[in-house]
Image (cartoon, helix red, strand yellow):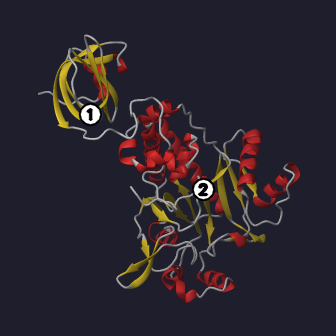
Amino acid sequence: MIHRVLAADLPRHVGRHVRLAGWLHRRRDLKSVSFLVIRDRSGLAQVVLSRPVPYPEETVLQISGTVVANPQAPGGAELTGPMIEVLAEAVEPPPFDLYRPTVPATLPTVLDHAPVALRHPRLRAPFEIAAAGVAGFRAALDGLGFVESQTPKIVGTATESGANVFGIDYFGRPAFLAQSPQFFKQALVGVFERVYEVGPVFRAEPHDTARHLAQYTSLDAELGFVRDHRDVMAVLREALAGMHAAVAERAAGALELLGIEPPEVPGEIPAIHFADAQELLARHTGEDPRGEPDLAPAHERWLGEWALREHGSEFLFVTGYPMVKRPFYTHPDPERPEFSRSFDLLFRGLELVTGGQRLHRHADYLAALTARGEDPQAYAGYLAAFAHGMPPHGGFAIGLERWTSRLTGAANIRQTTLFPRDLHRLTP
């Protein structure tokens, strides 16, 4: 029986009769011979014919033939004496030539025609990298005793605040699309101690920039019995190392195609306190951000360059952000209460991860909400877990598309987002 062979495996079957199946990537007709380049999930394979065939590119074909060694063919082998069966004929041409080594189309054209455009090997490659990264994230946290969870994406109250949420009609009642699984993953620390989730989150932020989306994929983790935020940072480092190792192993072809060598995740990622970072910026940039509650994008870029120059690291933790800039559940620094036990992780000068230690005592939550003018009763469901005893805990969230865009050097996060949703785009 003839079994289907993938294009990448063709060289291992020289002299055998095999069956290929895939899309007609390119057709080349010469005077005395024709070539078909077939694309499947593993790569490209060449088929040699003695006469031209009328099939348009992107037609789905099944081809049986004999494998012959040829150093000039993709992978060093080709299929000869083929018998061709058309599985589905393309009735429209693609929006641009998918066989060209570079993408001859603008980003709007790619996004408008994503179901076809993403077949281009260079456009598909970032998503192979992203998939490998998710696998590495899961493997790393599984190895640290975490339990994967799946939490609701329709919630009755806003997770982070009352703003920037998508409201929906839930059987006649107001509801929202979840901004994060934050409340759920904290509650699950009381069940499993260590939990993580890979899933969509929604932010109704009216930003029309190259780095913002209305929906993205969040890699969340939460762990109990921490001493402080530094334990959370250590777990994040392991998760990132696992992601980068998985990409090197599982997406080597995509990395090679894009000409990427992933940066090493240091054994200990350098860290700087927020106040010290502001002092550095004031001394060396000609600007004085001291007193500001957050870092501007230009300041993040400068700190990224500083970390690379001074520590040889493309990653940098900035810790101790002011409490006024952090959510109510953030744990303050006992020694400097105006600062928090929180952090951002910068990757190549851009915020990639936010995390920190959370409050864990019921009374502290009541005080924190009251201090911010919030009614604790509005958070009764969330606070219930803390009324029954919760350990010191903390967590973090990685934006998958942002991580992929920084790793691949994409100029726009939409290049690393499948079917992006933003201020203007709701299709395809």
Q: Amino acid at mark 2?
A: Thr
* Residue sitting at x 71%, y 59%: 319
Quadrant location of the C terminus? bottom left
Q: As rendered, which of 354 and 179 lies closer to the eye?
A: 179
Q: Which mark is residue 22?
A: 1
Could you give the CA–CA distance between mark 2 and mark 1, rounded to whole angstroms? 37 Å
Number of disc labels: 2
Residue 187 point in image, percent of width and height: 48, 73
Q: Quadrant of residue 152?
A: bottom left
**SS type, badge 2:** loop
Residue in front for this viewpoint, 343 or 60: 60
Q: Residue at x 54, y 50 (%)?
A: 413
Q: Position of residue 104 (x, y in %)?
A: 47, 35
Task: Check disc 2 and report the residue beneath it.
Answer: 209
Position above or below: 73 against 235: above
Looking at the picture, how far across and down is residue 18, in whole percent? 19, 24
Which quadrant would the N terminus be assigned to in this image? Answer: top left
- Residue 407 located left or right of residue 315: left
Position of residue 30 measured from the top left corner of the image (x, y, whole percent): 30, 14
Q: 24 and 185: which one is in front?
A: 24
The reply to whether residue 209 is visible in this rendering is: yes
Residue at coordinates 51% horizontally, 52% vertically from top-left?
Answer: 400
